[in-house]
Amino acid sequence: MAKKKFKAESKRLLDMMINSIYTHREIFLRELISNASDAIDKIYYKALTDENLEFDRSNYYIKIDIDKENRILKISDTGIGMTVEELESNLGTIAKSGSLAFKKDNNLKDGYDIIGQFGVGFYSAFMVADNVTVISKALGEETAWKWESNGTSGYTLEECEKDLTGTEIILKVKENTEDDQFDDYLETYRLKSIIKKYSDFVRYPIKMDIKSTKLKEGTEDEYEDITEEQTVNSMVPIWRKNKNELTDEDYENFYSEKRYGFDKPLKHLHVSVDGMIRYDAIMFIPESMPFDYYSKEFEKGLELYSSGVLIMEKCQDLLPDYFSFVKGMVDSEDLSLNISRELLQHDRQLKFIAKNIKTKIKNELSSMLKHEREDYDKFYKSFGRQLKYGIYDNYGADKDMIQDLIMFYSSKEKKMVTLDEYVERMPEDQKYIYYATGESYDRIEKLPQTELVSDKGYEILYFTEDIDEFAIRMLMNYKDKEFKSVSSNDLGLETEEEKKEIEAANEESKEMFQFMKEVLGDKVKEVRISKRLKNHPVCIANEGEVSVEMEKILSQMPN
Ligand code: ADP
Ligand code: MG
């Protein structure tokens, strides 16, 4: 049996691959299972056009076997198999993808479910194995072939025996070293959890022999150890199921299975878009704030799948910061992946999906605000601050997305109201949206500055968070109504006539005021008669548009 060498560049590529493309070693299993699933898909596509070929789903599966003693891990499939030529060209030449060629030969549009395209996934097996044997019998062939390699010096090919059409990938798992643990890949529970994590939604059953202890039949207290073949993947992802067949409970289970949060989500959104770019998404609006939400540790992002295979656990690009509380996943067949399938190029498809999702979330929140106000109040308590930050972010670039979603406490309603509700209620003669800033609602209520505005019958919004006034400044106005602090100099309450009266009175007492100003010196800028006080003898007003409270915050900020 002649030993063939990998081509020189192949060998270099292989070294590079093994050591650098993949950051998580455990993905070797994802790659081998994806190949097996591709191989079954190929029979399926062939059966669509070949009437002599039948596709009976029950004959197609992937099987994982462990032989701990001999350190063997075997991944078998009943897929299309490889001829000797294919073994040579697909596995003997690195970066040659038989799957990509298959897609081209069969005119399958890009994005068809077959996953392989780069021709490197197979070699990830060498991250955990120091020897790999592939035994394959191609569809319609009489003989089977065995390909074997230690990954560095080349490979051998010889004829061998195999009953069923399909492929077996046999890994001789590396021995543990001081720095590296490989024993794990011979443990059923570990392999099962890797399958669950990356390959749960592969369309064909992934089977394993699983040991358990069961009550012996016919007895009441005698137990026996049995080994049962079990399917470990759930196959059909919930997001591919028909929405009408899913209950709230199904979604809630998914939420907790995925550990998106420990609370019960307030809302779920199930989106299936079938346009130029196809994608499915399930997203949740949580009720309570994760404990680290407003800390540096918190990472936003949605899970990203490509044709049912997990690519990224937290894809940040899918969510704007102001919707960072949203949990969930996106699955698309139309993503352009880079070679390691771990990272995405920042491509147009992803941007498109992100933009789409942003609007869906906004619409969902708007509808919740309108139709499920109690839930919205709960949501807002947890995440309202983040929305307000969102207005301030990027110099208000996305304020239109958010301004209808924010709420403030109202002096009139004694509860949280939206800007829209405020403006709708404004009397005709009211020019501004008034707000008052302070530490708490109680404190604000006692502010002398609120008196005049309230007496006019106008509503005042209470700002108690640092971000409030900053966000409002970024908005400038809402539905053409400007915002006005109750502590600003010109409240816009007097009629023209009243204004003249005050001017005249000020003029009359000019000398006295000048004397007062001299006594008080720099402590005040000006002393004048005001109509703004009723029960309080004096108050401090500010000249510009910035409220006294905001001035306080600004003066505390490091320069
Ligand atoms: P990719 O999947 O990106 O094409 P891989 O390195 O994972 O690259 O696999 C290389 C090629 O080897 C595949 O394209 C396919 O033609 C072939 N192949 C690998 N595993 C199998 C398998 N289990 N059954 C049939 N063909 C396979
Ligand atoms: Mg592959």
Image (tube, rainbow, N blue to C red):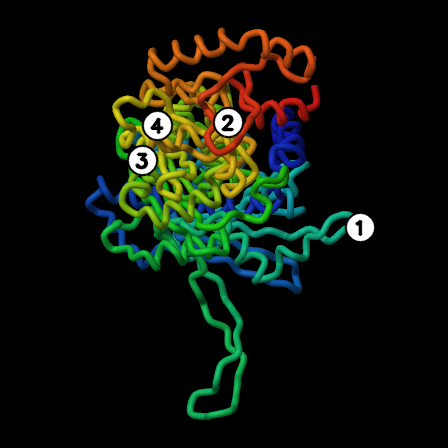
**Label 1: few (<14), some or many (≥20) within 10 Å?**
few
* Three-letter code, disc 2: Glu
Q: Earlier in the sequence, mark 1 or mark 3?
A: 1
Q: Which mark is residue 178?
A: 1
Circle nearer the viewer, 3 or 2:
2
Q: Residue 55 carries which label?
A: none
Say which quadrant the C terminus sits in. Answer: top right
* Three-letter code, disc 3: Asn
- Reading the image, the residue beneath label 4 is 104
Disc 1 C-beta below 8 A from ligand 1: no
User: As rendered, which of 501 and 50 lies closer to the eye?
Assistant: 501
- Which quadrant of the figure has residue 402? top left
Q: Earlier in the sequence, mark 3 or mark 2?
A: 3
Q: Can residue 458 be seen in this view?
A: yes
User: As rendered, which of 288 and 530 lies closer to the eye?
Assistant: 530
How far apart are labels 1 and 2 at the CA level? 58 Å
From the viewer's perspective, is residue 249 above or below residue 225? above
- How far from the left and from the top, in percent, is residue 131? 64, 47
Left or right: 274 in relation to 538: left
Identify the residue at image location x=39%, y=44%.
Answer: 415
Q: Earlier in the sequence, mark 1 or mark 2?
A: 1
**Label 3: few (<14), some or many (≥20) within 10 Å?**
some
* Three-letter code, disc 1: Glu
Q: Are marks 4 and 1 in contact (CB under 8 Å)?
A: no
Q: Residue 363 carries which label?
A: 3
Q: What element carries label 2?
A: helix
Q: Residue 469 carries which label?
A: 2
Identify the residue at image location x=60%, y=37%.
Answer: 22
